[in-house]
Amino acid sequence: MRNVFCAHYRVCLDQAARKNLPDVVCDACSHRNESIGIDETDFTEYRLLLWAIFKPELYRSYRAMEIREALQGKKCSRQTSSTGLAL
């Protein structure tokens, strides 16, 4: 069973996609019972999904910026992207 409310779900989903796995199953995971509150007024994740589908070059650019900032020890701000577009 999937736990889409887990704080780690996005990372697991990315790993499954990279490995071309047909499904993500959380049954054996130590985080399977964790849950985060979802702020339905924050549309950032929805916007990122739409970018990934319809504007993959923009999504790749944003993810690269996010990774660079994480490696530099900075917290990535989701208010603007490296392209200057508001998220």
Image: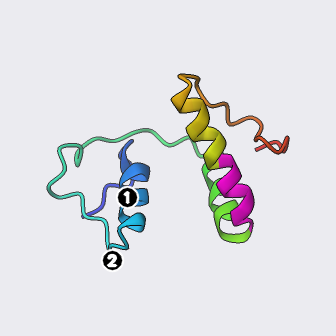
Is residue 75 visible to us here? yes
Q: Residue 42, relative to residue 56: is it above or below?
A: above
Dot 2 or dot 1, earlier in sequence = 1
Task: Name which residue lies at 42% across and 67% down.
Answer: 17
The disc label shown at residue 22, or none: 2
- Determine contact: label 2, label 1, CB under 8 Å: no
Query: Label 1, on which residue?
Result: 15
**Residue 9: image location, x then y, percent:** 38, 51
Outermost residue on the bottom side: it is 22
The three-letter code of the residue at mark 1 reads Gln
Outermost residue on the left side: it is 28
The question of residue 30 being in magenta is answered with: no
- Residue placed most toward the observer, 9 or 56: 56
Does 80 sit left or right of 31 as displayed? right
Q: Which residues are magenta?
A: 55-62
**Residue 27: image location, x then y, percent:** 17, 58
Magenta part, dominant SS: helix
- Observer-side mark, 2 or 1, equals 1
Q: Residue 39, relative to residue 58: is it above or below?
A: above
**Residue 28: image location, x then y, percent:** 14, 55
The disc label shown at residue 27, or none: none
